[in-house]
Image (cartoon, rainbow, N blue to C red):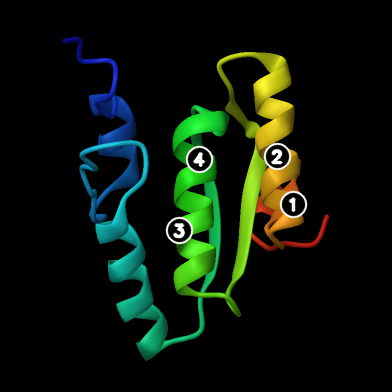
Amino acid sequence: DSEGWQIDSRVQQAMGDVLVIDKPTFGSCLLADHVAELAEQEELEITLCGLCTDICVVSNALLLKAHLPETKIRVAANCCAGVTPESHAAALKTMQMCQIEMVYTVQNAFGRKE
């Protein structure tokens, strides 16, 4: 066992008062359920980033899209990395085929115009 799965304390401190969901595996049904509850209260746009693109990011993106098919979901592709460059690219392609938008700048990731 390693602590590599934990959010670095400096990142957590910079995030401030946010909900952190510890997921038991690579995909989180709890996350999808929580976000679906939020979507009942207001229109959402979701941007994901993280490691590994080809394991956790793709799993959570597809779970969210399945729970919220009409919600705009983006992945900040240049803020992700896969196990290999090839598997990273394959995961991005998989998400694109499932109507998840890829963005490559911080401005685009958060819905701002460049």
Circle nearer the N terminus (3, 4): 4
Residue 49 appears in the figure: no
Query: To which residue does mark 2 refer?
Result: 92
| Dots 2, 1 in contact, CB < 8 A | yes
> Earlier along the polypeptide chain: callout 1 or callout 4?
4
Q: Position of residue 45 (x, y in %)?
A: 56, 70
> On the rendered structure, is 106 left or right of 39?
right
Q: In this figure, which residue is indicated by the disc labeled 3? A: 63
Rendering coords of residue 84 (x, y %): 63, 13
Split into 4 quadrants, where in the image is the N terminus?
top left
Residue behind mark 1: 96
Discs 3, 2 touching: Cβ within 8 Å: no
> Does residue 27 appear to the left or right of 9 in the view shown?
right
**Type of the residue with mark 3:** Leu
Front residue of 3 and 14: 3
Left/right placement of residue 26 relative to residue 113 reads left
Q: Residue at point 28% right, 16% down?
A: 4
Q: Is residue 48 visible?
A: yes
Secondary structure of residue under mark 3: helix
Q: CA distance from mark 4 to mark 2?
A: 9 Å
31 or 107, nearer to the observer: 31
Per the model, the C-alpha gap separating discs 1 and 3 is: 14 Å
- Find out whether the residues at labels 3 and 4 contact each other: C-beta distance under 8 Å: no
Crowding at mark 3 (Cα within 10 Å: few <14, some 14-19, many 20+): some
In this rendering, would 54 be left or right of 95? left
